[in-house]
Amino acid sequence: MYNMRVLNCKALEGLLSMTEVVECVEKAYDLYSSDKAGLWPVIFHEFEPGIRDMDIKSGYLEGAGLFGLKIVGYAADNPMKLKAPALSGLVMVMSIETGQPLGLVDGMTITNLRTGAAGAVGAKWLARKDSQKALILGTGAQGRAQLEGLITVLPELNSVTAASMDPEMDRIYVEEMSARFPGLSIRSVPWEKIGEPASISDIIVTCTPSREGFLKKAWIKPGTHINAIGADMTLKQEVEPSLVASALIFVDSKTQTLHHGESHHAFEQGLIREESVTEIGKVLAEENKGRRSEEDITLFDATGMALQDIITADLALRRAIEKDLGTVIQM
């Protein structure tokens, strides 16, 4: 018999800071790119294309003594029919040493935290240090997490423009984020007018479910950094392939991104080669310089790895033990 701790979204509230999660994600990238962690193939299935699907991402971190998985389900009509989120899921954390489960954690809270932290890592290591203006394309939960990540690592950031295809979501986003970050100037623009803020932004974040590249090469000025977050499956796309090809490309996992990340569209069209892509872990280990000049356009293609979820959920479980939070189940 053994004990397993379960953390729901309420137990996770305020348990981890974005700074701590950034450190977790950096460790995951470092272990992965130094062959001390690995991924197993992603399982994805569509029950109703564009309406209901699921995916399972899994992996191991020998350098942290952990393995596990995240399972996510998507039902597009949940908000309307059930007044419930379209996405839900769980993260299972296991011990390599004992082979036993350490805990089960709400997957969406962990996903938002670690994906926001992934964007923060990309900006921290690849954006210009004096970056002041950001454009966030996507004003859902991930648009919020991405802004929190940027604020954590870019002290000079002072202006944020946001946009999506839903003006009401944009209005709520600006209202909520302005209250949360009163030192920032935050505004929204209509989706059809994103070219203007894109042309003057130092950092651009794409975090939408788009299946067509909308961010155009012609809009982007020298020195811009792009965090491409939304394209985590083969059919998803946010960035024009010619823009990807014009940038210095950094990724979380070369295997994943060339197969189903933002980069894979340019790769399939022959615009980039496998050698065009560098894992961010190599930058963290100082095996690659990353940005080479103030004029470089850099792009971080983040498909999301189970390693990020596992190591972040493990920290949450350890903190929960210290604070006696969650529910302990005897198995």
Image (spheres, helix red, strand yellow):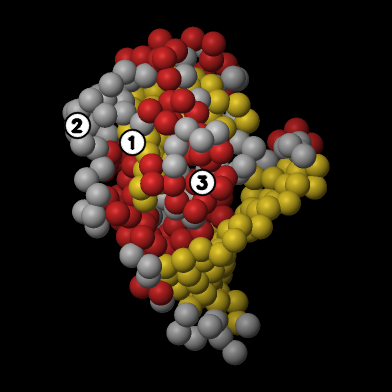
Identify which residue, 268 or 239, lies in the foreground: 268
Q: Amino acid at mark 1?
A: Leu
Residue 72: x, y in percent? 64, 53
Q: Give the CA separation, mark 3 to mark 1.
A: 15 Å
Mark 1: few/some/many CA within 10 Å (<14, 14-19, 20+): some
C-beta proximity under 8 Å, tags 2 and 1: no
Q: Which residue is mark 2?
A: 293
- Image quarter (top left, top right, bottom left or bottom right) of the N terminus: bottom right
Q: Secondary structure at mark 1?
A: strand
Viewer can see residue 215: yes
Residue 115: x, y in percent? 45, 46
Q: Which residue is mark 3?
A: 258
Q: Amino acid at mark 2?
A: Ser
| 36 relative to 293 in the view: left or right | right
Q: Amino acid at mark 3?
A: Leu
Residue 86: x, y in percent? 68, 41
Q: Residue sitting at 44 percent across and 37 percent down?
A: 272
Identify which residue, 10 or 55, lies in the foreground: 55
Mark 2: few/some/many CA within 10 Å (<14, 14-19, 20+): few
Residue 248 shows which numbered tag? 1
Q: Secondary structure at mark 3?
A: helix
Q: Secondary structure at mark 2?
A: loop
Q: Residue sitting at 33 percent across and 36 percent down?
A: 248
Q: Earlier in the sequence, mark 2 or mark 1?
A: 1
Q: Give the CA separation, mark 2 to mark 3.
A: 25 Å
* Above or below 29: residue 65: below
